[in-house]
Amino acid sequence: MACAFPMRRLLRLAFWAAALFAFVMAVLPHPPQLPGAPTDKVQHILAFAVLTALAVAGWPEAPRLRLLVGLSGFGILIELVQMIPALHRSADWRDWLADTGAILLILALAAAIRPLLNRPRYREDSGTRTVIDTHLQ
């Protein structure tokens, strides 16, 4: 368990760095073209899938509804900021739908995977099973 807390700190730092990067890229008047030239919706889906995965890993005890509301709210904030004329960006409610869809998908995957990660590991000794580790507890 001692290793979990430094890793959690690192994941939280990665989350905030990714959130800052996503925000800056979303509000730059002329953002750089990404490799492969993914569409705007693909960029939104990828950004919010990564943010959600980092949030789930960095704050495993956080209620999932709080993560959904917070991340979806971040998507709304991005769209509202893109309405500022000086940025020469265009807001699109479908971008927010793509963000929220990605958030819901990753939260569902995390909920499905969590029981598998939380199963105890056993050691077999002369016919007896001993718990040697419980993950995420």
Image (cartoon, rainbow, N blue to C red):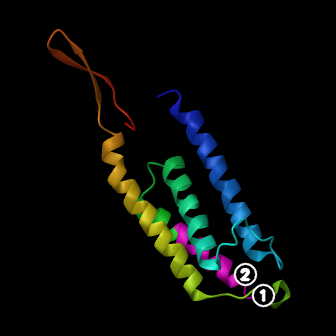
Disc 2 crowd rating (10 Å Cα; few below 14, some 14-19, many 20+) is some
Q: Is residue 57 left or right of residue 135?
A: right
Could you say whether the residue bearing mark 2 is in a helix, strand or loop?
Answer: helix
- Amino acid at circle 2: Val
Task: Find residue 75 and report its horizontal and vertical position in percent.
Answer: 60, 75
Q: Is residue 36 left or right of residue 134?
A: right
Task: Find residue 52 and report its horizontal and vertical position in percent.
Answer: 52, 60
* Residue 99 occupies quadrant: bottom right
Q: Which residues are magenta?
A: 70-83
Could you say whether the residue bearing mark 1 is in a helix, strand or loop?
Answer: loop
Residue 46 lies in the magenta stretch: no
The residue that label 2 is drawn on is: 81
Question: Which residue occupies the extreme left position in the image?
Answer: 127
Residue 82 lies in the magenta stretch: yes
Residue at (83%, 78%) from the top-left corner? 30
Image vertical order of residue 23 relative to residue 91, above or below: above
Residue at (45%, 54%) from the top-left corner? 62
Are discs 2 and 1 less than 8 Å apart at CB?
Answer: yes
Task: Find residue 63 and report its horizontal and vertical position in percent.
Answer: 42, 58
- Amino acid at circle 1: Ile
The residue that label 1 is drawn on is: 84
The one of 40 and 8 positioned closer to us in this rendering: 40
Between marks 2 and 1, how big is the CA–CA gap? 6 Å
For the C terminus, the quadrant is top left
